[in-house]
Image: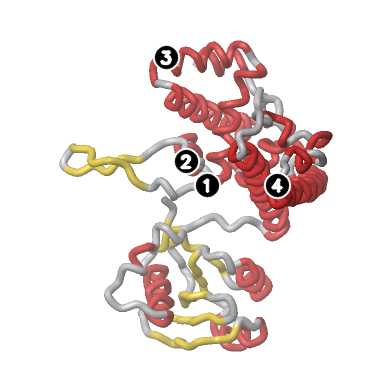
Amino acid sequence: MEFCKPETDYCAGVDLHWDNMVLCVLRRDGEKLVHRRLRNDAKTFGRVLAPYTESITLAVESTGTWYWLCDLCAELGVKFVLGHALYMKWIHGAKAKDDYIDSEKIARILLGGNLPVAYAHPKELRATRDLLRRRGRFVSMRTGMISHIKVVNAQVNMPALGKAAAAFDTRATLGGRFEDPDLAMSVEADAVTIDYYEAMITQIEKHVLERTREYCPKELALLMSAPGIGKILGLTIALEVHDIARFPTRQDFCSYCRLIQDAHRSNGKASGSAGHKIGNPYLKWAFSEAAALSPRYDARVNALLQKLQKKHGHGGGLSVLAHKFGRAVYHMLKNGTIFDIEKFVRG
């Protein structure tokens, strides 16, 4: 875990909400200079912070509204630090809690050099990354519609649909399978919604691929050299990682990808594991998908998976293989080399 140790004359903590914030500015000796609620307005924020912008570090918790504040601080020449929300949970566990208490605590842990830092993606990549995440949400919703069609089909004990529920050439006629007009309309509504989602998903994929080629074409080409990693998984990994240099070691990268578990230990004894929600769930998904898909494209990977599953079980074998993919991708991006299948299966 990286901690911010500011060297500026002033430290500021912000408890940020959708339409307002509470700003707390401390001097290096700990004296409180500003502690007030502000509207989320760039001019108001700049005016209040103006006396301190020559030497100030500002910290905010990594909630969903920090983008505009990060960009505004860059315009004002203010050093911006994004605090890791899950590592800062102790703020929410205090006996007394409100916006003023939280903003002052953020400022004071920043002043003491104990603020856990989260990575703030650059402005030019944030919207593209979020659009690809949105695409994943649409895929999940489309899958839910397909599952609902199969459930309705099973409720009336009709022959199983199999892949027909997702096939474009048969979806339009699915409603005719049901005598009940209400069931027929329910299935037709699902089919229309699936068509809409598929069109939107295709547009998003095309748009994101074009945008990513502007920023990380080399990284995308390297990633797609691995079996099981196509354009969607490659785009996900490239956009979520952005800069592999921010991970000092392979272990740090795999931990960020949720590919390893940390154990709670005390007096030499383990007491379970923790931190299941700390890390990047999108990278966890990408490497899990790569582990499941890669055996279909390479017999050597399939043989390795069979060996791992014999030792660790079905799920355990896939988890170990996903971890191996994470380690391989780290070295691929760090060294600029393509996937080495011989080294992968041998290691």
Q: Residue 285: x, y in percent?
A: 56, 39
Q: Which residue is mark 1?
A: 280
Numbered badge on residue 241: none
Numbered badge on residue 180: 4
Mark 1, secondary structure of its residue: loop
Relative to 343, residue 61 above or below = below
Q: Which residue is mark 2?
A: 258
Q: Earlier in the sequence, mark 1 or mark 4?
A: 4
Mark 2, secondary structure of its residue: loop
Can you tell which of label 3 and label 1 is closer to the viewer? 3
Q: Residue 167: x, y in percent?
A: 77, 34
Can you tell which of label 2 and label 3 is closer to the viewer? 3
Relative to 131, residue 146 above or below = above
Q: Amino acid at mark 4?
A: Asp
Residue at the image position 43 percent from the left and 62 percent from the top = 5
Real-space Cα separation, disc 4 to disc 2, in angstroms: 47 Å
